[in-house]
Image (tube, rainbow, N blue to C red):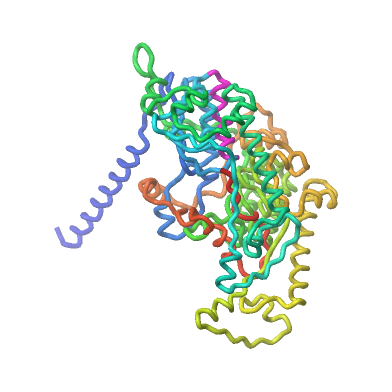
């Protein structure tokens, strides 16, 4: 055998061996066991939960990024399992959750489908606070390991202010905003909350707290005042939680699982939710509904995901998606799933225009997730119907923008900048000088124009007078519940309800099965997805985003000076 032929044979054998290894590994991760009768579904509730598959990012991050669970798959899978005669019950393993309140409620509602079908639910609560307990409370039996601390002590929201740091660095913020409650620039211009910002944030916390107390009181079958008192008395160790009626038993996770599946003639079979999803098909039909995931901070260009910026919703990507949907005759309606705090006003308007174009031909139903605020509400306002969870953070109809003058910091570092220009306002957006009074007036006028356009877009989409929109605008942040009372939201509900509304608007009978097409389409091939799964426990591209205050600083830094921002004030995280 010649050397060249030997090398060729070796390469072929190596390729075959590699393919066999990939197949074996994939099979081990996705066993082919079928769904047995009387099975218990085991749901290991993930710490992170995405709306859809994350867009591509840095090549290293993109190759190693895990394929994290997606909300729409979990919700539709749970609801399908609830009606599946082969599934006898559900076991939840609940630990720390890094989701927002709307996602928690969405999954909880799907879990409650099991109770509605008379199927038992067991939940192992392994740590966390109100979010985790709210999900676990959907179970018939809640068990807690002996040394678990239940951090039930109420809700709070904090905001970070950088003005003191900027002063120390001799950086001068030049920001303006339109809307009394549009407090996005306060992090850079103040050392504390304005009265308006505090009022809006307090109302938001109050709405979420009231809904939490009502839900928990109903789940544990105690008076509302009793549950409120229990939250005031927290946190709890496991024995105390049992004594106070917050849980039903003190057991390790494995012991609770055994309690759930044991029967006289042997244990019932179990199947994980991931494997159940692998072995079941979603209902399909000749008519299609497009589920468009619009998640991340809004900016120009393509959607992307990087360690520094996090998830970015690109107007270019959304334009291509909406154009494809517009031209597909089989797609009878669109559900636009919005999970965004906003971002660039220009990019928000571009996406709004594409949604408006599709809306002229087909029904568009917005389903609001954790956030659909500022630019997130901007793109939603073109829809036929808006459906929000009561805990969705929305509204924030306002705009702000400006620049940071860093020449003082340069001088501290021994640097200097000299500029030569031609034109009266050539240096208006320069980071090395403050606005002149004339430049400040011009910039204020540009922000006012963006705000007036935003208000008019909402007025047209919601069929309201601009003056009526103005009463609920001004940058005020609302819960989904509060927004529904003020005409900014049509219905309260989740993804399932949004799909039902889309079918109604498209004149599709409620009993008729439809095919759900998810957009944007995945840009990662099989090999990339497989490698992502292999490294699922070894990669976390959001580490930088979890450092307190860094997210807000990154979001501010990634937008050029002078760009009008329809962006949620602060990073609102109510815990």
Q: Residue furthest top?
A: 264
Q: Residue furthest front?
A: 233
**Looking at the picture, how far across and down is residue 288, in whole percent?**
62, 38
Rendered-image quadrant of the N terminus = bottom left
Q: Quadrant of residue 299?
A: bottom right
Identity of the residue drawn at 44% across and 26% down: 239
Visible in this render: residue 404? Answer: yes
Instruction: Determine whether 40 is above or below 415 in the image.
Output: above
Instruction: Report the magenta stretch's main SS.
Output: helix
Q: Nearer the viewer, residue 301 or 554?
A: 554
**Looking at the picture, how far across and down is residue 112, in whole percent?**
56, 26
Instruction: Determine whether 565 is above or below 119 in the image.
Output: below
Rendered-image quadrant of the C terminus = top right
**Looking at the picture, how far across and down is residue 238, in whole percent?**
44, 29
Q: Nearer the viewer, residue 345 or 444?
A: 444
Identity of the residue drawn at 57% across and 30% down: 230
Instruction: Determine whether 259 is above or below 346 in the image.
Output: above
Magenta highlight range: 102-118
Residue 108 relative to residue 423: left or right = left
Q: Nearer the viewer, residue 267 or 225?
A: 225
Q: Was residue 104 drawn as part of the magenta stretch in this picture?
A: yes
Identity of the residue drawn at 60% across and 22% down: 222
Q: Was residue 487 drawn as part of the magenta stretch in this picture?
A: no
Q: Nearer the viewer, residue 324 or 157?
A: 157
Q: How many marks?
A: 0
**Looking at the picture, how far across and down is residue 380, in whole percent?**
69, 48
Q: Quadrant of residue 231?
A: top right
């Amino acid at each position: 055998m010649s050397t060249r032929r030997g090398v060729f044979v070796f390469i072929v054998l190596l390729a075959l061996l590699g393919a066999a290894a990939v197949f074996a590994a994939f099979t081990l991760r996705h066993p082919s066991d079928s769904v047995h009768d009387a099975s218990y579904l085991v749901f290991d509730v993930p710490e992170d939960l995405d709306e859809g598959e994350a867009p591509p990012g840095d090549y290293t991050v993109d190759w190693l990024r895990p394929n994290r669970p997606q909300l729409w798959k979990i919700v539709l899978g749970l609801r399908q399992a609830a009606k599946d005669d082969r599934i006898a019950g559900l076991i939840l393993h609940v630990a720390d959750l890094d989701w927002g309140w709307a996602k928690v409620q969405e999954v909880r509602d799907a879990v409650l489908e099991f109770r509605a079908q008379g199927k038992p639910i067991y939940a192992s609560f392994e740590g966390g606070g109100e979010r985790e307990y709210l999900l676990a409370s959907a179970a018939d039996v809640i068990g807690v390991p002996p040394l678990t601390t239940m951090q039930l002590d109420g809700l709070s929201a904090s905001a970070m202010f950088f003005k003191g740091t900027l002063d120390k660095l001799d950086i001068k913020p030049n920001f303006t905003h339109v809307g009394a409650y549009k407090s996005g620039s306060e992090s850079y211009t103040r050392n504390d909350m304005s009265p308006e910002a505090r009022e809006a944030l307090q109302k938001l916390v109050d709405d979420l707290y009231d809904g939490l107390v009502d839900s928990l009181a109903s789940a544990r079958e105690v008076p509302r005042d009793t549950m409120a008192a229990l939250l005031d008395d927290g946190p709890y160790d496991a024995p105390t939680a049992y004594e106070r009626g917050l849980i039903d038993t003190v057991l390790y996770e494995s012991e609770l699982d055994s309690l759930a599946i044991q029967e006289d003639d042997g244990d019932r079979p179990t199947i994980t939710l991931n494997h159940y999803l692998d072995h079941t098909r979603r209902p399909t039909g000749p008519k299609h509904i497009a589920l468009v995931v619009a998640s991340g901070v809004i900016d120009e260009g393509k959607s992307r995901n990087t360690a520094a910026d996090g998830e970015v919703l690109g107007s270019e990507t959304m334009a291509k998606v909406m154009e494809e949907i517009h031209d597909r005759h089989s797609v009878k309606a669109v559900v636009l799933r919005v999970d965004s705090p906003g971002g660039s006003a220009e990019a928000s308007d571009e996406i709004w225009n594409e949604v408006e174009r599709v809306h002229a031909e087909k029904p568009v139903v917005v389903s609001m997730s954790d956030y659909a605020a500022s630019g997130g509400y901007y793109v939603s306002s073109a829809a036929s119907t808006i459906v929000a969870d009561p805990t969705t953070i929305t509204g924030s109809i306002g705009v702000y923008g400006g620049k940071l003058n860093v020449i003082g910091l340069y001088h501290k570092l021994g640097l200097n900048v000299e500029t030569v220009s031609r034109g009266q306002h050539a240096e208006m957006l320069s980071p090395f000088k403050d606005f002149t009074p004339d430049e400040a007036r011009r910039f204020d006028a540009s922000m006012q124009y963006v705000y007036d356009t935003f208000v008019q877009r909402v007025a047209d989409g919601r069929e309201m007078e601009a003056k009526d929109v103005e009463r609920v605008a001004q940058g005020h942040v609302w819960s989904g519940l509060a927004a529904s009372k003020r005409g900014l939201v049509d219905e309260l509900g989740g993804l399932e309800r949004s799909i039902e509304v889309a079918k109604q608007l498209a004149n599709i009978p409620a009993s008729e099965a439809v095919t759900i097409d998810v957009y944007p389409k995945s840009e990662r091939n099989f090999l990339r997805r497989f490698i992502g799964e292999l490294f699922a426990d070894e990669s976390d591209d959001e580490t930088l985003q979890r450092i307190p205050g860094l997210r807000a600083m990154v979001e501010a830094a990634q937008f050029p000076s002078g760009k009008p921002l329809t962006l949620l004030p602060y990073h609102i995280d109510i815990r």
